[in-house]
Amino acid sequence: MSRFLAAAAICLFALTLVAPATAAGDPEIAALQVGLRQKGFYAGTVDGVLGESTANAVRRLQRRARIDVDGVPGPRTKAALGLFGKRSPLGKRILVADARGWDVAALQFALASHGFPSGNFDGYFRVSTERALKQFQVWAGLPADGRAGSVVVTALKAPAPTCPVTLAPPVAGPYTDVFGPRGNRFHGGLDYPAPSGTPVSASAAGRVTFAGWSLGGWGNLVVVAHAAGARTSYAHLSQIGVRVGQPVESGQRLGRVGSSGNSTGPHLHFEVHLRGAAVDPLSGLRR
Ligand SMILES: [Zn+2]
């Protein structure tokens, strides 16, 4: 390797170490993180990024397994994860309900990154994973058979969808938690912490398709349908000021911030969906 290439490789490696947690993480690294979590070597976020904390967890596993301690997850490191690690990588077998292992964890992470989260990243192909897989198959125009073979794996390599409409901020004020991995789950929207009663407004013109109490933890929820198959959702409201079927303008008041449903404090949980897939609201939000 030339000196230049070596320097470039070191730069790339350094970049990898400081890469932020994003929805564009590598499903194979996410599966490694799930395996490390299950063995008690990693307590960080399952973000698909081989950062310093993940490399340190790999080193702890390597030390325990008495193999070369280099922080690089090679075949012997995967083997040290037992049966879980043997199921690597995603795509080597067709995944169906009740499957377990590395490849299932990678599938769960890839589905979430494409807008179909299914609860905990745990490497178990249960009902929630099957439901998310079938939703993705419908979304991608594939037969919804709940089987993840090479066609599904290839479809999941395409870039995740983005928001096709321009969005105004639904709350005046900053957001905190973003769209992406959070712990060993996936946060499907943006959180705007704000005092209870803060006005919540429509992010774009559209028509109200849901306004009321939602099962599933969202509390008082408003959903607005927009052009191009986009929908915005406004959850945990303390008050709802619109009704189903009502047309709304961008910036029109929909309700007020609250903490209804499964929420630990007053905030707006804001989601954007495109034909059923959760997409990163930041891809549409006007800056
Ligand atoms: Zn949230």
Image (cartoon, rainbow, N blue to C red):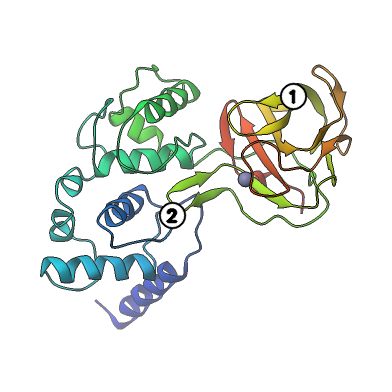
Q: Amino acid at mark 1?
A: Gly
Residue placed most toward the observer, 135 or 126: 126
**Rendered view: 230 above or below 25:** above
Q: Is residue 225 left or right of residue 126?
A: right
Residue 135 got which mark?
A: none
The quadrant where residue 199 appears:
top right
**Rendered view: 23 above or below 260:** below
Specify which label sits upstream in the sequence, 1 or 2: 2
**Residue carrying label 2:** 47
Residue placed most toward the observer, 162 or 223: 223
Q: Amino acid at mark 2?
A: Asp
Q: Is residue 275 left or right of residue 186?
A: right
The residue shown at (51%, 55%) is: 22
Residue 258 rendering spot, x and y as whole percentages: 76, 42
**Residue carrying label 1:** 212
Residue placed most toward the observer, 140 or 189: 189
